[in-house]
Amino acid sequence: MDYQDIDALTEEQAKAELARLAEEIAGHDARYHTDDAPEISDGDYDALRRRNLAIETKFPELVRSDSPTHRVGAAPAEGFAKVSHIVQMLSLGNAFEPDDVHEFSDRVRKFLSVPDGEPLLFTAEPKIDGLALSLRYENGKLVQAATRGDGRIGENVTANALTIKDVPHKLEGEDVPEVFEARGEVYMSHEDFAALNERMAESGRVFANPRNAAAGSLRQLDSEITKTRPLRFFAYGWGDVSHVPADRQSGVIEAMGRWGLTVNPRMAVCASVDEMLAYHKAVEAERASLGYDIDGVVYKVDGLDLQGRLGFRSREPRWAIAHKFAAEVATTVLEDIDIQVGRTGSLTPVAKLRPVTVGGVVVSNATLHNEDYIKGIGGDGEPIREGRDLRVGDTVQVYRAGDVIPKVVDLDLSKRPKDSLPFVFPETCPECGSDAVREEGEAVRRCVGGLICPAQAVERLKHFVSRNAADIDGLGAKQAEVFWADGWIKQTADIYTLEERFGGDNIQALKSKEGWGSKSAEKLFRAIDERRILPLDKFLFALGIRHVGEGTAALLARTYMSWDALRIAMEAMAAGDADARATLVNVDGVGEVLADALSAFFAEPHNLEGLNALLTHVVVEDAAPPAQQGVLAGKTLVITGTLERMSRSEAKARAEAAGAKVSGSVSAKTDYLLAGEKAGSKLKKAQELGVSVLSEEDWITLIES
Ligand code: IVH
């Protein structure tokens, strides 16, 4: 078929062609993946995908929801199909100390306006150290099992889940809803783990801990292998459901148990923080004899109406928290101190340890945080370890808590070798020789080499391709390092010209590298193509700016909505525009530290050059506007005065969930003023400007309509 030049396409023609391409490519996918009977050559197929992508790049507003660029439903022959979670799979915030649990309870009470004297129930249950699994039942029958993935998209592991004996193929009971997505944790018992490793030892490969064993077993491509692995499952929550069988968390768990799912027999309901802490203590005491790994206790607000009101912040529910157990400890020798340079130039000292088992895992590296930490000075400038420094050759104690990187926490001075010397922290970067500077009030020393520092450049590259960032399949940290070392990828933009430089007739160079053949190269090029359009939040996170984690990237995306708007604001701020800075700092969840980091990033010419190069290959998709229906969508609301029926934070969260922006001051742009009791100057100003004023009654009616 002859194709019209893309630049000459009208919007209408482009739309029609994207529709045709989506259908045609889907047909080829099915014939290739499902029927194993492709009709066209790989080259022709790729040409179709490329044309589709080129049109999408020219007309980003026409990208279809079933675009082949985004559709990952057809499994690559050697991978799992992807599953979009209808309800996101979230993670949990952590509490470590009893005070953190008190604060959690206080936060919940404040948000819900439940005074201290009034009862508030929480469930408490063990936090299983495994991996999350979602099981979708339709009309009682298990139709799909999926891993958590990045919370939005996971892997379809249905065939494997069906081999787990705690996973019923059918739910039994009068009240089983039409759709019920049960969520819980897959894990392996200590006994089964030991036996599996004994079997595996013959092949020379063993798992480091039961969690890795569970993950490795669930993610086997051949379900026959999973079947031989003794996996277990506890259900503790739910996702997409047509009906909730109770009005309390504890009630739903009880129902899931009745229907045949395995639920943890230790779940309890607590009526106070004291009861929660007592529960934690009791479970911790039982920990060693449970027979499976747990790394803490999870508390959840029991009332589902309250859970609904509390909602989520970033990727964590406000209504639940994980109370972690104290770490495990072991003694070993500090053999050396290495300095690693991170993506933002930070020099981090890493302890090289004589290998030691801590809580079932062999540890040979541990963090030493920063130079003060080695000297025996804490974050607040006060002495730690009674001021004792750490030296190579010292006998040290190592702590490991769950997933957290092990730490060196203390030392035994009596065992210090006579000839040991204090550690001298480098003042130049071990990677590029640039100065390593410690700014006033900072604990961290940073290399000033920016992108000329190879360590920073390669760390940024690894971050860019990583799972929760651009997520380029086939280009993991290892491959990125190799391409970088060979000079094939010097900056992120170079990823997108790999095919131009090393595809087609030039494939030989790539093929001569270990582990690369025509097929894997093709796969890599396609994976890269699929990431030529990146959602704003992923793009921002992928840039690897200091302090811009996933949650912050999402927050910035929601605030500015488009890359252009964000960039204009950031560059203005970097150039000293006070208004641009004030707008950013006014966003709930943004502080001066983040504003400084963004200013520093956008003020650096190297970064802007790198960005411009990247943007010649990548289209940044606008953030999806929040819930579009309803009178509050897209409106700006200001809250003032005292509210009787909900806290200000709840009112704000409800408004934001309904798509409104909550601002701190009344202006001509304000759509509504929610005025509680004793409203003052803001009410006056709103009246002067003719802004609609809502009483608390009006407000409740509005959000409940
Ligand atoms: S509730 C919205 N309950 O811990 C709340 N999670 O660190 C979702 N986990 O991703 C989680 N035991 O994989 C919950 N009893 C439990 C759990 C549990 C283990 C895991 C889960 C979650 C992770 C967060």
Image (tube, rainbow, N blue to C red):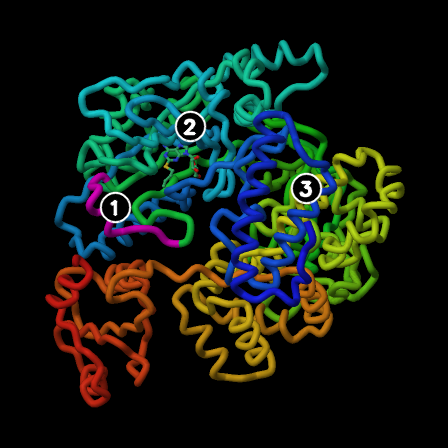
Name the residue at 50% across, 17% down.
190
Judged from the image, the secondary structure of the residue bearing numbered disc 1 is helix
> In the rendered image, which residue does mark 2 sit on?
144
Marks 1, 3: nearer the viewer: 3
**Image height of 130 relative to 54, above or below:** above
Q: For ligand 1, which image quadrant applies?
A: top left
Q: Amino acid at mark 1?
A: Gln
Q: Amino acid at mark 2?
A: Gln
Relative horizontal placement of residue 702, taking residue 585 as reference (left or right): left
> In the rendered image, which residue does mark 3 sit on?
45
Give the camera-side residue of 14 and 456: 14
Q: CA distance from mark 1 to mark 3?
A: 48 Å
Give the camera-side residue of 17 and 326: 17
> In the rendered image, which residue does mark 1 sit on?
307
Question: Where, quadrant-wise, is the C terminus in this rendering?
Answer: bottom left
Magenta residue check for 627: no
- Give the x, y percent position of residue 38: 65, 31
**Image height of 66 relative to 237, above or below:** below
Q: Is residue 209 visible?
A: yes
Question: Of label 1 and label 3, which has the lower sequence position?
Answer: 3
